[in-house]
Image: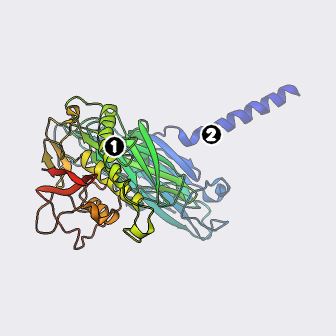
């Protein structure tokens, strides 16, 4: 009696392991798999071969997995749909050494039928071709179809100029597409140096989302950039730092990638999980700098809005040294300015200089402006918005902070200047460039805003270009001590 129980338990264990292993084992090419609704991961599909699947619909509806969207309210599959997704995890690589202009490998082909049991190039079935490594297809299931749906995934035969094989995932569900294509616009590339890159999310009202970032050299996802699986299989998710900031009730996340190769093209995929569901943002492409004359700095104590690449100075080269040096420089100018603003009768209602601005607004505006002009921002080497410079914008007493090598600069936004003149007393004498001269400020969309919201549509004020001199003056007590020399 005891032995019979032991036999039953052992048999149950073997059957359980079998069904757990089946969805992830490596399938042999040119074979047929009896598949369940869910996800099948294929480790390898050689060129010129096919794998067929049989989805026996009536037998495994209860085993169907949950999927975010779109959702079906049906409780039966009769007269309903099956949602299929196929996504390429890896594709054969081009021999770019032999031919740098060689196109990506051909896309996988998918053949689907509700009649032919082995659809493919040599049989019947409706043919679909993946686009950028992704395909979704909705197949209606008519009443009386108890056999199922037949799917063939075919890897085209390529020339000897392409190396390795195809890897892919296939998903099927009655509730929605298992794999979601990255279609959400919620991420943008912000900055890079020769070893690091900075991405930022759009501002949102969501307080605490979870982010997952995968980045990869662009050649690894060439032709399969719409496949989340491609980024997960070919890329990295380590060496990523997330910084969440809040302004005016909106939240933004800065995504910092480090330990990258210099002068290399990358592609990054970011997924956001929150109470609103799962979103996969459209991949962002960028290239690290080939030169090492700029470094991204962050976590400054005073100029806390600075999170971008800055030029190296005479004796400061590391991120920590530059962050402290630039921060102290800007803070010293700000401390001098506070000696003036603190003499102003800010709390005297009779001397109030504005109905909507006060001395705190003036200090904040001056802080943003002084941080932007004392901490220059590097532009990318191929940027059309950058200007070549070889020295700071202002005279610096601390010689260790002098810049001794050329760099491309992204000029401060002229809006920082306008905001300063609007926020401070007119008696302070701050001036901005007028429209008759050329300035070295930048316009919205092509300048260093230091996190300030600026309009991307030029108005009469913002159409001012730049000046051969900075005309904004820093007032110390009762006279002007600084004129910007360019």
**Secondary element at tag 1:** helix
* Whole-percent x, y for residue 32 in the image: 50, 47
Q: Residue at x 38, y 39 (%)?
A: 234
The first of marks 1 and 2 along the sequence is 2
Q: Which of 406 and 461 is in front in this view?
A: 461
Residue 281: quadrant of the picture? bottom left
Which residue lies under the disc numbered 2?
20
Which residue lies under the disc numbered 1?
331
Q: Which residue is drawn at 32% across and 38% down?
A: 328
* Whole-percent x, y for residue 483 in the image: 17, 52
Q: Nearer the viewer, mark 1 or mark 2?
A: 1
* Whole-percent x, y for residue 42 in the image: 47, 42
Q: In this view, does 375 lie to the left or right of 127?
A: left
Q: Is residue 45 visible?
A: no
* CA–CA distance in space, label 1 to label 2: 61 Å
Residue 70: quadrant of the picture? bottom right
CB-based contact (under 8 Å), mark 1 and mark 2: no
**Secondary element at tag 2:** helix
Query: Quick one: label 2, few (<14), some, or many (20+) residues within 10 Å?
Result: few
Query: Quick one: label 1, few (<14), some, or many (20+) residues within 10 Å?
Result: some
The relative height of residue 176 versus residue 89 in the rendered view (above or below) is below
Q: Nearer the viewer, residue 7 or 446?
A: 446
Q: Residue 238 carries which label?
A: none
């Amino acid at each position: 009696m005891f032995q019979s129980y032991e036999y039953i338990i052992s048999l149950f264990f073997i059957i359980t392991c079998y069904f757990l292993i089946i969805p992830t084992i490596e399938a042999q090419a040119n074979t047929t798999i009896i598949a369940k609704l869910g996800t099948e991961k294929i480790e390898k599909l050689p060129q010129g071969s096919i794998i067929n699947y049989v989805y026996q619909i009536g037998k495994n509806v209860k085993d169907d997995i949950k999927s975010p969207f779109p959702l079906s309210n049906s409780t039966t599959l009769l007269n309903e749909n099956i949602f299929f997704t196929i996504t390429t995890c890896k594709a054969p690589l081009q021999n770019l050494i032999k031919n740098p202009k060689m196109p990506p490998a051909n896309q996988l082909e998918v053949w689907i039928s509700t009649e032919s049991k082995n659809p493919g190039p040599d049989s019947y079935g409706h043919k679909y071709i993946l686009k950028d490594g992704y395909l979704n297809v909705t197949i209606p299931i008519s009443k009386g179809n108890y056999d199922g749906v037949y799917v063939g995934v075919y890897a085209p035969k390529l020339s000897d100029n392409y190396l390795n094989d195809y890897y892919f995932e296939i998903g099927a569900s009655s509730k929605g597409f298992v794999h979601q294509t990255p279609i959400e616009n919620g991420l943008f590339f912000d900055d890079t140096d020769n070893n690091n890159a900075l991405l930022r999310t759009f501002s949102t009202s969501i307080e605490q989302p979870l982010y997952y970032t995968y980045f990869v050299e662009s050649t690894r996802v060439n032709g399969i950039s719409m496949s989340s699986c491609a980024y997960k299989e070919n890329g990295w998710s380590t060496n990523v730092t997330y910084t969440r900031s809040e302004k005016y009730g909106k939240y933004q996340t800065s995504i910092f990638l480090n330990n990258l190769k210099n002068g290399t093209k990358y592609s990054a995929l970011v997924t956001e999980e929150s109470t609103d569901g799962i979103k996969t943002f459209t991949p962002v492409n960028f290239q690290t700098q080939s030169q090492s004359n700029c470094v991204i700095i962050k976590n400054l104590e005073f100029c806390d809005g600075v999170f971008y690449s800055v030029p190296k100075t005479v004796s400061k080269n590391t991120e920590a040294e530059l962050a402290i040096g630039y921060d102290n420089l800007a803070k010293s100018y700000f401390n001098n300015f506070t000696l003036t603003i603190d003499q102003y009768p800010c709390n005297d209602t009779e001397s109030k200089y504005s109905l909507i601005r006060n001395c705190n607004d003036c200090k904040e505006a001056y802080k943003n402006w002084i941080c932007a002009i004392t901490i220059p921002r590097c532009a990318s080497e191929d940027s059309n918005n950058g200007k070549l410079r070889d020295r700071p914008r202002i005279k610096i007493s601390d010689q260790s902070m002098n810049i001794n090598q050329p760099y491309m600069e992204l000029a401060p936004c002229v809006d920082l200047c306008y905001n300063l003149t609007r926020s401070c007393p007119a008696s302070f004498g701050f001036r901005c460039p007028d429209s008759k001269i050329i300035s070295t400020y930048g316009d919205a969309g092509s300048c260093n805003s230091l996190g300030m919201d600026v309009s991307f549509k030029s108005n009469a004020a913002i159409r001012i270009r730049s000046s051969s001199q900075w005309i904004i003056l820093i007032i110390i007590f009762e006279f002007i001590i600084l004129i910007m020399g360019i």
